[in-house]
């Protein structure tokens, strides 16, 4: 591993906070979903990097990455389902204007 | 001559791709371009997994993120019209460029494929797959089954969420 672990963690952190900024700044629901995917993928990079650095015996970190893949797929399917059903009720995609369920 | 400088250079290129793609997803107003750049980010991330020696994870990354999730998000973009971008005809003027790009990717693959299949077949069981599979099917067997149940529940839930439950209204919309 000629590239140090810190470099991978730095890339992971930058991508995570880019996605976090996107979730906070953007108002399109589909873009927010994309930014959540970016954050999940940044976490995957950190998991694999730590797994390769410290877990040389087994692949525990990579197993968790597989579970993150499953969660990401389920999340995007259900998230798009919610977005599409909300869009069908009222054709807006801006999350600030979707407030029918607000108490 | 040593090749120690290759890995940092590849890492630098991949990290530039990952971060630039992520920033573009956040900054761009054209949703289709943002979704495709998200796929670009995921591809660079798969390259990073290969660089880390996790080839199986890289393959999963390409299959699930670049394949399934990007296509799903593109479907979401298509079904929800976003009013800020009037340039909905994203691909229309770029057909020659697209043909050139596809040819630039496809022709080397065909050439390399025809050349390399004459060599000896690779042996199975390499890389990180044995360790990963051992972990999944011994220590993590129960969470693995729970994950499959979660996927089934998500699939049924997505169908139930997007289903029209009023057949009369659905027929009326279809006629319109």
Image: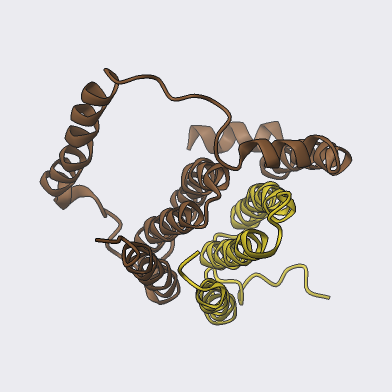
Chain colours: A yellow, B brown
- For the C terminus of chain A, give its image quadrant: bottom right
Q: Is residue A60 above or below residue B172?
A: below
Residue drawn at x 77%, y 42% as measured from the top left: B135
In the image shown, does A6 or A64 lie closer to the viewer?
A: A6
Q: Is residue A80 above or below residue B117?
A: below
Residue B168 visible somewhere in the drawing:
yes
Q: In the image, is B145 to the left or to the right of A98?
A: right
The mark tally for this picture is 0
Q: In the image, is B138 to the left or to the right of A38?
A: right
Q: In the image, is B86 to the left or to the right of A18?
A: left
In the image shown, does B57 or B168 lie closer to the viewer?
A: B57
Residue sticking out furthest to the right: B142
In the image shown, does B149 or B62 lie closer to the viewer?
A: B62
In the image shown, does A40 or A62 lie closer to the viewer?
A: A62
Q: In the image, is B105 to the left or to the right of B140?
A: left
Residue B156 visible somewhere in the drawing:
no
Residue sticking out furthest to the front: B1
- Residue B82: % across, % down: 43, 63
- Residue B8: % across, % down: 37, 69
- Residue A14: % across, % down: 51, 79
Q: Quadrant of residue B7?
A: bottom left
Q: Is residue B99 above or below residue B15?
A: above
Q: Quadrant of residue A102?
A: bottom right
- Residue B38: % across, % down: 44, 60
Residue drawn at x 66%, y 43% as measured from the top left: B162
Residue drawn at x 60%, y 68% as measured from the top left: A39
Q: Is residue B82 above or below residue B175?
A: below
């Amino acid at each position: 591993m000629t590239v140090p672990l810190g470099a991978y963690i730095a890339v992971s952190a930058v991508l995570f906070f880019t996605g976090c900024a996107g979730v906070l700044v953007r108002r399109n629901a589909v873009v927010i979903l994309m930014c959540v995917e970016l954050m999940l993928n940044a976490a995957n990079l950190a998991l694999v990097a730590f797994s390769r650095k410290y877990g040389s015996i087994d692949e525990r970190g990579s197993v968790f990455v597989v579970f993150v893949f499953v969660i990401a797929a389920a999340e995007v399917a259900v998230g798009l389902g919610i977005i599409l059903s909300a869009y069908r009720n009222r054709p807006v995609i801006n999350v600030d204007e979707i407030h029918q369920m607000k108490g | 001559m040593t090749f120690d400088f290759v890995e940092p250079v590849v890492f630098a290129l991949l990290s530039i791709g990952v971060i630039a793609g992520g920033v573009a997803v956040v900054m761009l107003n054209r949703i289709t371009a943002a979704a495709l750049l998200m796929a670009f980010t995921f591809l660079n991330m798969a390259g990073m997994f290969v660089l880390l020696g996790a080839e199986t994870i890289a393959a999963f990354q390409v299959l699930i993120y670049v394949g399934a999730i990007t296509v799903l998000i593109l479907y979401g973009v298509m079904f929800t019209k976003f009013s800020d971008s009037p340039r909905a005809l994203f691909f229309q003027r770029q057909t020659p460029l697209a043909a050139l790009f596809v040819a630039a990717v496809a022709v080397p693959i065909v050439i390399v494929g025809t050349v390399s299949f004459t060599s000896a077949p690779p042996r199975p069981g390499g890389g990180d797959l044995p360790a990963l599979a051992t972990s999944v099917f011994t220590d993590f067997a129960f969470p693995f089954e729970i994950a499959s149940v979660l996927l089934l529940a998500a699939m049924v839930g997505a169908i139930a969420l997007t289903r029209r439950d009023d057949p009369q209204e659905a027929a009326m919309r279809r006629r319109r």
